[in-house]
Every structure is written in C-alpha cells, then in structure tokens.
Image (cartoon, helix red, strand yellow):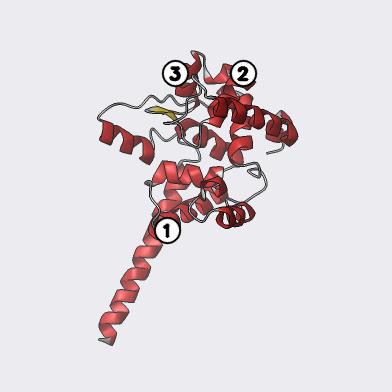
Amino acid sequence: MTHYLNRTIKSGLFLAVAFAAITALLVLALRWIDPPSSAVILTWELSSDRKARQQWRSLENISPNLQMAVIAAEDQKFSRHHGFDFASLQKALAENRKRTRGASTITQQTAKNLFLWNGRSYLRKGLEAWFTLLMETLWSKRRILEVYLNIIEFGEGVYGAEAAAQAHFGTTARHLSASQAGLLAAVLPNPIQMSASRPSPYVRSRASAIHRQVQQLGGRRYLQAM
C-alpha cells in the first residue's frame, strides 16, 4: 500500500512538473510567435461550422484609440497590476457574487480566450490563473495587449481589431477613430447582444463614459508609460 502511494505521488509530481514545463515553453514561444487562432475561436468555428473573421495585426497597426478604449473599459490598472486586480475582485464579489467578469483583467481574459474554454469550474479558473502568471512573467504588457486585441470577440464570428474595424465601420484597425474605438470597447461585455455599428442608447452612453475614462487615464501618455 505504501509503495503504491509513493508511486502515485511520484507520478503526480512528474505530471505536474511536465505540465508546468510544457505550458511555460508554449507561452514563452508565443512571446514572439503570433498565435494563428485561439481556443475560443476554434470552439466557435467547430460549433457553427463556419470560418471566423480574424486578421492578425501588430500593435503598431492597431489604433492607439482602440488600445486605450479597451484598457479604459476593461482594465484601468492594466499597466500597474501583475495579472490580477484583487481590489476589483473583492468589490465585484461584494456587489454580486455571480458577476465577477468586471474583475477579470485583460491578462486573465487573454489567458482564457487563448488557451481555455468558457465555464465556471475551479479547474478552468485554476488554469486561467496559471496561464495569467506565465504571461505576466514571460510577456511584456504590450505583447499581452497585442494578443488580446487580436483574439477578443467583437461580434458573432468577428474576432480581433482588424476584423471588427472592417465589419463594423468599413475601415482598418489602424485608422479607427476615438468614437469608433469607444463603441467597439463598449460592446465587449456582450458583443453578441450589443453592436458597435448599430449602437443602442446604452452602448452610446457607455462609449461616452469610456471616452471620459480614457482622458482621465492620460490618453496616449498611458500607453507610452507601459
């Protein structure tokens, strides 16, 4: 019995170390290699039997207006935290224990969308935390933001800044105006029910609030300090 228990412990430790090493190497490689897709995009394509709209763009080819809009909307402490915003998480839990999305940082959202699946299991949250730590350790903030902006959903089958700019405004990610960027960021909580190109009064109001928050954060000076 003791021998069997020791073997089980050793096997478990080996698997844990192997998983940690493999995932760390994967995340390290993606510091330089642009991921061709993401777990969330592949899941959508398999479930819908359609090809998602997505075109990779470097951060330099994504308007600073959109970069700042998503930071203002989703994670205003992005440049300062190390992957987790515990103060926002505590606030979200206090307000509504079932609604914690607002406490998810851009790094956490990127980890989930790139590597994992939708759901609320402890296993998925644990893996999300692990990949978040790896990304914050091995990637720059600019790389995290770049990957995020290329895989985030902006509408049904529309992923990433370039596809969103074309689908909603007939322009490119590089030429998005502050107004267009605000509308795109405003729909991120629910891009299926809300539309940037056909904005409801709520989306317009939220976009205006995002614009004010961008100004409070310092606008493009915020990006230069990252």
| Residue nearest the observer in this picture, 185 or 28 | 185
Circle 3/circle 1 CB separation < 8 Å: no
Whether residue 60 is visible: no
- Element type where label 2 sits in the image: loop
In the image shown, does 60 or 114 lie closer to the viewer?
114
Q: Is 45 positioned to the left or the right of 64 in the image?
A: left
Residue 226 spot, x, y in % from top left: 67, 39
User: Is 202 placed above or below 103 here?
Assistant: above
Left or right position of 73 against 197: right
In the rendered image, residue 172, in percent from the top left (x then y), is placed at: 52, 17
**Residue 76 quadrant:** top right
Q: Which residue does the image show at 59% across and 25% down from the upper left?
A: 204
Q: Which residue is mark 1?
A: 20
Number of numbered discs overlaid on the protein picture: 3
> Residue beneath label 2, please?
177
Label of residue 167 in the image: 3
Amino acid at pointer 3: Ala
Element type where label 1 sits in the image: helix
Sequence order check, earlier mark of 3 and 2: 3
Q: Secondary structure at mark 3?
A: helix
At label 2, counting other C-alpha atoms closer than 10 Å, the crowd grade (few under 14, some 14-19, many 20 or more) is: some
